[in-house]
Amino acid sequence: MSRKKAIFIDIDNTIIHGSSLNILVKYCYDKKFLKLSLLLKSLYWYLLYKLDLIKNFDKISQKVLIMVSEIVGKITVEEVNAIFKDCFETQIKPKIYAESEEFLRASHKNGYIIYFISSTITPLAKLLQNYFGFGIVVATEIEEINGYYTGNVKGPICYGIEKLNRIEGIWEKENIDLKESYAFSDHISDTPMLNKVGHPIVVNPSRKLKEIAIKHHWEIKNYSL
């Protein structure tokens, strides 16, 4: 039996310009769901993340989810998903990099299995999956109780070594040929994932990741809208 080929691709700053959670927080502020102070906190944390100055990303992600829970905890999952969908259609979809979309669609036609692997929340990642019409989502699960999102994370946040833990199970189960597979990311936290495949590619890399990419002769791509 021939082994499968896969593409493990981050979402934020790799498929789309910016952070999907950050875009969601700003959207909620514009819709007057959130206070300005919460928006500024979110932007500040995102800046620290891009500058590689955050050591405990899990805590920051949890804080952003707590912000979102100010909204999602008050209305049903169905109503929240409608908000997420409108945010995706109006704010996130226009930020998809054309180069990334073209590569993914061509790769899918050529038989690659596409894994959207991201620290963002699963409902947002699934909207991207639906847009493409293919792929498998591996993202951060949020807790749902009695038809409401609680804002709490269900299991570990899909970040750093946790991404590697998740995809290790995937490639063993699906008989994936890592040497023929690709991984895409913009951030140094995904170095463990990039190290595992035959074709690691960094997109709009952070400073530290760019240094690693140059050292290891990884391909560097710079996408723009």
Image: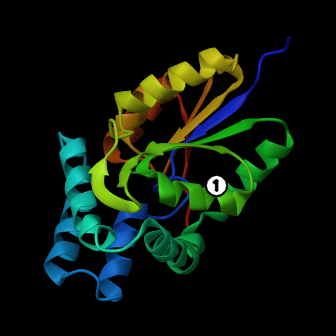
Q: How busy is the neighbourhood of tag 1: few (under 14 within 10 Å), some, or many (20 plus)?
A: some
Question: In the visual, does 14 lie left or right of 72?
Answer: right
The amino acid sitting under disc 1 is Gln
Tag count in the figure? 1
Query: In the rendered image, which residue does mark 1 sit on?
Result: 129
Q: Give percent across and percent down for residue 94.
A: 58, 75
Can you see residue 215? no
- Give me the residue at 54% from left, 72% from top: 85
Q: Position of residue 120 (x, y in %)?
A: 41, 52
Residue that sits furthest to the top in the current view? 1
* Residue 70 location (% of width, % of height): 23, 71
Residue drawn at 29 percent across, 67 percent down: 73
* The quarter of the displayed image where residue 31 is located: bottom left
In the rendered view, does 66 fall on the left or right side of 169? left
Return the x and y of residue 145 as percentages of the image width and height: 35, 54
Q: Is residue 15 left or right of residue 154?
A: right
Query: Does 33 sit above or below residue 106?
Result: below
**Label 1 secondary element:** helix
* Outermost residue to the left: 37
Quarter of the picture containing the N terminus is: top right
Depth order, front residue of 165/97: 165
Residue 213 versus residue 178 in the image, above or below: below
Q: Look at the image and tell me whether residue 33 can be seen.
A: yes
Q: Quadrant of the C terminus?
A: bottom right
**Which residue is depicted at the point 43% across and 23% down?**
165
